[in-house]
Amino acid sequence: MNLRRWLRPGVGVKRWLGVAFVGLTALALAGALALRQLYRDVEIDGPAQAAISLVTLQFLPYWVRAAVLLGLGVFVFAYGSYRVVRALLGPFTESAEEPLVDLVYRRRLLARGPRIVAIGGGTGLSTLLRGLKERSANITAIVSVADDGGSSGRLREQLGIAAVGDIRNCLAALAETEPAMAKLLQYRFTEDEGNLAGHAVGNLLIAAMNAIDNGDFEEAIRHMNRVLAVRGRVVPASGTPLTLHARLRDGGLIEGQSRIARMRAIESVWLEPADVRASRDALAAIAEADLVVLGPGSLYTSVLPPLLVPEIRAALATTPALRVFACNVATQAGETEGYDLADHVEAFVAHLGPVAVDIVLANNHFAGSAPDLELGVPVKLRWPPVGAARRPRLALDDLVDPANPHHHDPELLAASLLRILQREGVPGRRLGVARSA
């Protein structure tokens, strides 16, 4: 155990060692006063006087005596503190994958990180969370529950619970459990495994926890956060199963998230039931946030659905937090095919209003992003016209994953968002006013 590393700034040990040292000094002074009074009240001579003189070093000059006692006291105190810390933390250091001092240091720094709310679903949200978890422990992921395909759709149809697939992905992204647990959550049964074929283990665990909590979906997700030691928390946008609807530009109406994701020329989307209640945890997190990140992810089927819950939309309009829309780095075959940056922003504003976002963050690094009609093409940086009413500000940065140029890099995206927050501050708190829609 390296004692010097325990004393570096940020660990929070030095201040309490200082407090303990002050207490010991007070005890030592009390003892010195008691001895002084003893010498005055009791006459000691002969061999006893010689012994006391030897123990108290009275045969040495005063300044030498003080230096020796001070050095001895500091050494004994430091060594005793070291042995106490080692005895208390020994059982934990034996199984830790990193030195405990580094673990404590990292967690204390993360605990002082900004309060960040990330809203969305799908692959984009879990990608963002993997980057943010290394910079703050005060993260709340508000996740869409409108999915109706695959394992989530089957569980929703059979058990009547809200969609769990996106929640599972976010729990896995923020969990601090062993890597094997993350693999277990994401394991999907194969066609050879009977009725379980297609189900992800994490989806089944959430469904089981929902049954244990007597159908209280929000409480079930709170329990999953604790069981998986999630850094931050994951909350559903609502505890009620939601159905996504879309109107196409040709007037056609489509029902169901999985079908809408394959459609082109989407004009608008909405939820049923329209008056669904939002999660209490989600509303509280938005009200207390320093930064609210919207996206990235599928625009119509992942990012917009949780924002269309009326109470979440109202909370977003009045939060004092800085609100950033993280635009995708590439279009999606189907729902955003042919979209540029302006199209993304205009669709966003059309559904939520012009004051729903302060800044739009977009990628400006296109090296290696060769067009691919199946995976999408890089989003072109056309910006809404100058006369657009109350349009948000634009921030550009290198956000693309070099190994997967159709997706964000988690580290680059998280770092860019925190630079924006550091530069812009928290507008509502800085100005002392809340925004109005």
Image (cartoon, rainbow, N blue to C red):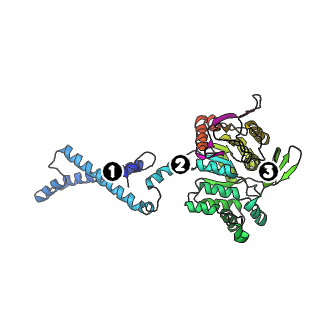
Position of 158 with respect to 18 (left or right) is: right
Q: Secondary structure at mark 2?
A: helix
Instruction: Please state which amino acid type lies under the numbered disc 3.
Output: Arg
Q: Is residue 84 above or below residue 400?
A: below
Q: CA distance from mark 3 to mark 1?
A: 74 Å
The residue sitting at 32% across, 50% down in the picture is 25
Mark 2: few, some, or many residues within 10 Å (few <14, many ≥20)? Answer: some
Residue 110, numbered circle = 2
Q: Quadrant of the C terminus?
A: top right
Q: Quadrant of the N terminus?
A: bottom left
Q: CA distance from mark 3 to mark 2?
A: 39 Å
Q: Earlier in the sequence, mark 3 or mark 2?
A: 2
In this rendering, the label closer to the viewer, 3 or 2: 3
The residue sitting at 51% across, 47% down in the picture is 109
Instruction: Please state which amino acid type lies under the numbered disc 1.
Output: Ala
Q: CA distance from mark 2 to mark 1?
A: 36 Å
Q: Earlier in the sequence, mark 3 or mark 1?
A: 1
Residue 262, numbered circle = 3
Residue reaching furthest to the top = 386
The residue sitting at 60% across, 40% down in the picture is 416
* Magenta-tinted stretch: 387-411
Which residue in the structure is indicated by mark 1? 26
Q: Position of residue 110 (x, y in %)?
A: 53, 48
